[in-house]
Image: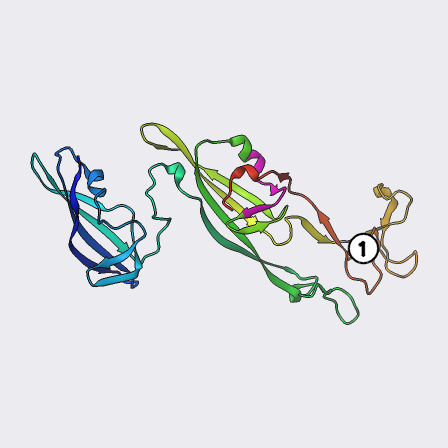
Amino acid sequence: MSVVGSATVIASWLEPNKEGHRTYKTIYQVITNDVNDGPITAMSAGGLPVAGGVYVYGNDSDSWAFCHAIPEVKLKEYDESRKQWHLTYTHSTEPMERCQTTSIENPLMEPWAVEGDSDEWTEEATTDKDDEAIDNSSLEPLTGKEIEVFKTRRRLRLSKNLASLNQDLIDDIEGSVNDGNVTIFGKAYGARQLYMRKIRFTRRIYATCTFYYPHEFYIDTKQATHDLKVIDRGFKEYTGTDPTDPKHYTPIREPDGDEGEVVREPVYLKDGQRLPAGNDPEELEFRYYPEEDWSGLGFPT
């Protein structure tokens, strides 16, 4: 069971597509000396292209056309002492979905896949690019549609075939933020900068009856943190002796003395008191999303 000599080139041709990519097909002939030899033996012959190698044929070459890992192998002639095989290799300039250095038989060996997108919405701006308050000429914070700005947030979709299904882990992670540093494809994120929007999974079979589970992780990223940040404003202020008791907060009145009319629009506050004119609005921060340990997810770094 062996290959006779080395592979020899029979022919090569070009198949361009409408996008301008170049795909080359090259046929190699291989002879084996045993009637029981199969295509794997034929693929072991010397002189065949290697996965990822560039296209070379006689006087021609294309340094941007790379070899696909697995050729098409056909048996052309055979008798009791020999077999003649034709192996058709493909070199192409078209982008590939994954590395072609080796073929993958086990779906669990497929590498992580990543896709990116962005969400866009509008909200009222409270500060400019230099973190200065957006006020009018009387140092009052501006509000309304005139100061609504576009905001964006990146969304990632990571996918991987996993050997098992851990629904308890999914229940914990889904709807949570990361509790510590996480690096994904070279980008480092600090605690609470990632939010697990949802996790999808399915069950599939390979070989005779072996299950595996493709997973998809949908993640929102944020340069700040996934926390609620709102301007401190309201209709009541602290006037009592116990700041933890809501009864010690009374309605804010217009600045006309004790008999002034109760304000109809929320006013800016600081530490439960009406914010003096000319001061920048205070921002309150609330941590709504629970933190979970994401280190066991195995994201590619």
Residue at figure coordinates x 46%, y 49% from the top left: 114
| Total marks in image | 1
Q: Which residues are magenta?
A: 171-183
Q: Amino acid at mark 1?
A: Leu
37 vs 88, nearest the viewer? 37
Q: Is residue 174 visible?
A: no
Q: Is residue 291 visible?
A: yes
Residue located farthest toward the front when viewing the structure as drawn: 5
Q: Split into 4 quadrants, where in the image is the N terminus?
A: top left
83 vs 21, nearest the viewer? 83
**Residue 18, position in %: x, y?**
27, 62
170 vs 2, nearest the viewer? 2
Residue located farthest toward the top when viewing the structure as drawn: 209
Residue at figure coordinates x 22%, y 63% from the top left: 60
Q: Is residue 1 above or below residue 221?
A: above
30 vs 230, nearest the viewer? 30
Residue at figure coordinates x 30%, y 61% from the top left: 63
Q: Is residue 73 above or below residue 120?
A: above
